[in-house]
Image (tube, rainbow, N blue to C red):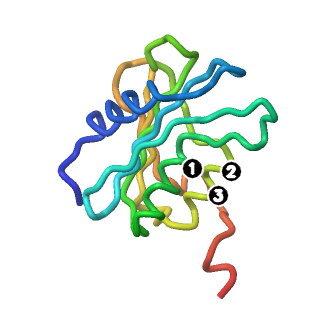
Amino acid sequence: MSVISDRELLEIAAEARKASYSPYSGYSVGAALLAKSGNVYTGCNVENAAFTPGNCAERTAVFKAVSSGEREFEAIAIAGGKSGTDPKDACWPCGVCRQVLNEFVDAKNFRVITNSPSGEPAVRSFGELLPFAFGPNNLK
């Protein structure tokens, strides 16, 4: 277990959000993925005029981590909102990002962290966000 706090991980996600390329939706997102090794991988959303070739912040972070050899993760923090605003509201991962994360995480122990209006990080287990998931164990 890493010594980085949920709040610190959320601050790293907010910093990653600054690199967002979101000229079409105006909704910028940053993610910080904590690997069990203690390494943190960041990502931001990258939009495209054709829409579907774009990529979410969470998947960007996962793909960076996996391409660096990581396969086990503890938590992901996500900060998002209208571009140019402080991320104060919850920004949970989309369905596609949940499916990608499902490939690599332990649903009971992996934490998903985002902002909340109270100012305290909102934390849920991955299993709460994707119950009855289809994943690698279904193919064994």
The numbered mark, 2 or 1, whose residue comes first in the sequence reads: 1
Front in this rendered view, residue 57 or 91: 57
Q: Is residue 80 above or below residue 62?
A: above
Q: Kindly indicate the quadrant of the structure image that contains residue 70.
A: bottom left
Q: Residue at x 58, y 27 (%)?
A: 21
Q: Are marks 2 and 3 in contact (CB under 8 Å)?
A: yes
Is 68 left or right of 96, judged from the image as shown?
left
Position above or below: 23 against 71: above
Q: Quadrant of the N terminus?
A: bottom left
Mark 2 vs mark 1: in front: 1
Q: Give how far across and how far down residue 72 sits, in percent.
A: 40, 67
Quarter of the image with the C terminus in it: bottom right
What amino acid does circle 2 point to? Val
Which residue is outermost to the right?
50
In this view, the residue in front, 126 or 77, is 77
- In the drawing, does residue 122 fall left or right of residue 7? right
Kind of residue indicated by mark 1? Arg
State yes or no: discs 2 and 1 in contact (Cβ < 8 Å): yes
User: What residue lies at 32% left-to-right and 50% top-to-bottom?
Assistant: 40
x, y (%) of residue 19? 47, 29
> Marks 2 and 1, Cα distance to the nearest angstrom?
9 Å
Q: Which mark is residue 96?
A: 2
Quick one: SS at disc 2?
A: helix
Q: Position of residue 130 (x, y in %)?
A: 62, 54
Left or right, 67 with reference to 39: right
Real-space CA distance between mark 2 and mark 3, rounded to the nearest whole angstrom: 5 Å
